[in-house]
Image: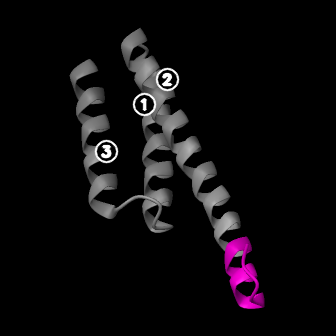
Amino acid sequence: MANIKSSKKRIKVTQAKTLRNKMVKSALKTSIKKFETAVTAGNAEEAKVLLGSAIKSIDMAASKGIIHKNVASRKKSRLTIKFNKMA
């Protein structure tokens, strides 16, 4: 354990940021999974709505720096291709 006051603060801040990043990443994975299950079920109406929410969560994660902007772009592209193949 750290002895210096600033080191203790950095540990606390890092833990808080790690929790936030995990929360956003988990929500991102959940929204992508929901979209993919709608696509496999063949539900175009629901998939269209879920695609929008998945893209929104991907953009949010990229803007917060949780995922790289190129990773976000690649994920959005792949999800859109899946939707277009279904439709």
Left or right position of 1 against 79: right
> Disc 2 marks which amino acid?
Glu
Which residue is disc 3 drawn over?
75
The reply to whether residue 42 is in sight is no
Question: Circle 2: is it few (<14), some (14-19), or many (20+) Cα within 10 Å?
Answer: some
Determine which of the numbered discs, if any, sits on residue 46 in the image: 2
Separation (CA) of disc 2 from disc 1: 5 Å
Q: Nearer the viewer, residue 11 or 56?
A: 11
Which residue is disc 1 drawn over?
48
- The residue at the point 30 percent across, 28 percent down is 83
Q: Main secondary structure of the magenta part?
A: helix
Q: Is residue 10 magenta?
A: yes
Circles 2 and 1: CB atoms closer than 8 Å: yes
Determine which of the numbered discs, if any, sits on residue 72 in the image: none
**Coloring scheme of the render?**
one colour
Q: Nearer the viewer, residue 19 or 58?
A: 19
- The residue at the point 78 percent across, 89 percent down is 5
- The residue at the point 21 percent across, 23 percent down is 85
Dot 1: element: helix
The magenta segment is 1-12
Q: Position of residue 62 (x, y in %)?
A: 42, 61
> Disc 3 marks which amino acid?
Lys
Dot 2: element: helix
Q: Position of residue 7 (x, y in %)?
A: 69, 84
